[in-house]
Image (tube, helix red, strand yellow):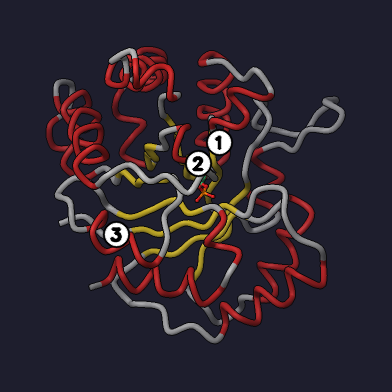
Amino acid sequence: MRRPMVAGNWKMHGTRASVAELINGLNQQALPAGVDVAVFPSCLHIAQVVDGLVGKVVAVGAQDCATEAHQGALTGEVAASQLVDARCSMVLIGHSERRSLLAEGDEVVTRKFAAAQSAGLMPVLCVGETLAEREAGQTLDVVAAQLAAVTESLGVDVFADAVIAYEPVWAIGTGLTASPEQAQEVHAAIRAQLAAKNAVLAGKVRILYGGSVKAASAAELFGMPDIDGGLVGGASLNADEFGAICRAAGS
Ligand code: 13P
């Protein structure tokens, strides 16, 4: 039995004032005990969130990390070990916005994944196809290649301490959600790909769905056998909505 997880990716949103308001709202949520809840604020707001959520069992993560695990001369970047020092426990790796807008390829994604783990962070590897790729019937191949880039370089066992998020690019921030059946098909394929190398591990790894998850759509998505929770963007900026999504994962 896999423990569900709901993660909120705040992306490049927030000011000190709006983050304070969001923390206040989250502190008022009844979060289900059986669900791992995590939030990923901008780097600027990590300390504020860690301090503000004291007493709440919510993990805090970063949205990216450097390819190097440790401090050094790399202007503008943040090392995974610095994130650990800031009391982060997780980090998003390979989000599609970074893959497409910042040209992050599989090699960089794999290096960041390795850097995160070597510093003690749990990576959340994001994979997903574009609309053109889906329409060309390439969804499973694209996702398989993104996953294989990591497993071929680092081995499958790295997923004993990692989470996977399937986020179809066409569903991110568009209000379009993959149907539960469309998402389940990809989640099952991801799990089968891991199972071909390590069946026990594949049965344990959590695969989250992301792409316009809302409280209204969450329960149906999370009811699918291989969907173990969600990576939530826009809806995670509203504490009540995010709380409702967390509760849907616990029911
Ligand atoms: P939305 O929930 O806003 O579609 O964003 C999904 C996402 O990219 C989470 O990482």
First reached walking from the N terminus: tag 2 or tag 1: 1
Res 82 → quadrant = top right
For the residue labelled by badge 3, is the local secondary structure a helix, a strand or a loop?
loop
Mark on residue 4?
A: 3
Residue under label 1:
116
Task: State how far apart marks 1 and 3 are (Cα).
Answer: 22 Å
- Sequence-first disc among 3 and 2: 3
Horizontal and vertical percent position of residue 178: 33, 42
Secondary structure found at label 2: loop
Q: In this view, does 161 lie to the left or right of 95?
A: left
What number is the disc on residue 48? Answer: none
* Picture residue at 57% right of the left edge, 56% below the top: 234
Along the line of sight, which residue is nearer the eye, 115 or 164? 164
Q: Residue at (23%, 59%) from the top-left corner?
A: 220
Q: Quadrant of the C terminus?
A: bottom left
In the rendered structure, which disc, 1 or 3, sits on the residue that comes first in sequence?
A: 3
